[in-house]
Image (cartoon, grey):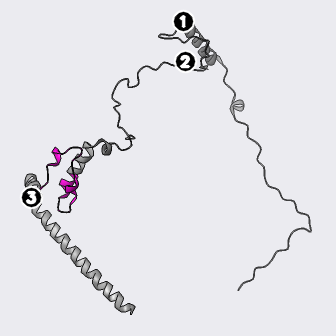
Amino acid sequence: MSRWANRKAAVQAEAEALEVAKAEAVIAEQHAALAEKTEEEVLAELELPNPDEMGAGDDFSAFMKETVPAALRNRALKRLWTSNPVLANVDMLVDYGEDFTAADPVGIVKTIYRVGKGMLPDEEEVVEGPAAPEVVDEVEEEVAEVETAPLPTPEEAAPTLAPRRRMRFDFEAGSLPAATEMETV
């Protein structure tokens, strides 16, 4: 009984494949005929609007039919994505989406952080504008201290490593297990 069911399924699959092939041949024939016409003639024949004149909220579903040439469909989709900001920038995480050509995009940043000292305590004054002479003197003294400090010797600079530990097993003379032979089958 299953032989007849398999044969019936094979005949049905062949019929479906033949129908699909015929439909693809008709579509290929239509595309070949449309390729010879100008774009305005193709739009008029398929009763489609000009995709360049469409905007947000227009219905672009007519361009998704199989009879529409791929180049025209792609142009309509491009216009759809550029006309709708939701589709043009889905997650606001577009790489290189910002304008980095500006000379100073952030502007001047004022901070109370001092290099080498950290954040200033609340009681110290925040220096605005050019650095005060006493701040410049402090920085010059710190730079001089760093420049005159002696360099460490290679032994001092080398990190100290913990000694390597090796596993060691001590067995008493009679406590070793007897070697067993493997049986072969």
Q: Position of residue 124 (x, y in %)?
A: 60, 11
Residue at 15% in and 70% down = 26
Query: Looking at numbered disc 3 in the image, what kind of residue is underneath it?
Result: Glu
Kind of residue at disc 2: Ile
* Mark 2 crowd level (few <14, some 14–19, many ≥20, 10 Å Cα): some
Comes first in the chain, label 3 or label 1: 3
Extreme residue in the bottom direction: 1
User: Camera-side residue: 138 or 22?
Assistant: 22
Mark toward the viewer: 3 or 1 = 3
Q: Are marks 3 and 2 in contact (CB under 8 Å)?
A: no
- The crowding category of the residue bearing disc 3, from other C-alpha atoms within 10 Å (few below 14, some 14 to 19, many at least 20), is few
Q: Are marks 3 and 1 in contact (CB under 8 Å)?
A: no
Residue type at tag 1: Pro
The span from disc 3 to disc 2 (Cα, nearest Å) is: 70 Å
State which quarter of the image contains the C terminus: bottom right
Q: Which one is earlier in the sequence, the residue at label 1 or at label 2? A: 2
What residue is rendered at 58% in x and 13% in y?
139
Label 3's element? helix
- How many marks are shown on the rendered structure? 3
Residue corresponding to mark 3: 45
Q: Is residue 64 magenta?
A: yes
**Pointer 1 and pointer 2: residues touching (CB < 8 Å)?**
no
* Residue annotated with mark 1: 133
Residue 82 vertical position relative to residue 40 in the rendered view, above or below: above
Q: Which residues are magenta?
A: 46-74
Circle 2 residue: 112
Q: Classify residue 183 by image quadrant.
A: bottom right
- Quadrant containing the N terminus is bottom left
Left/right of residue 33 with respect to residue 139 in the rendered view: left
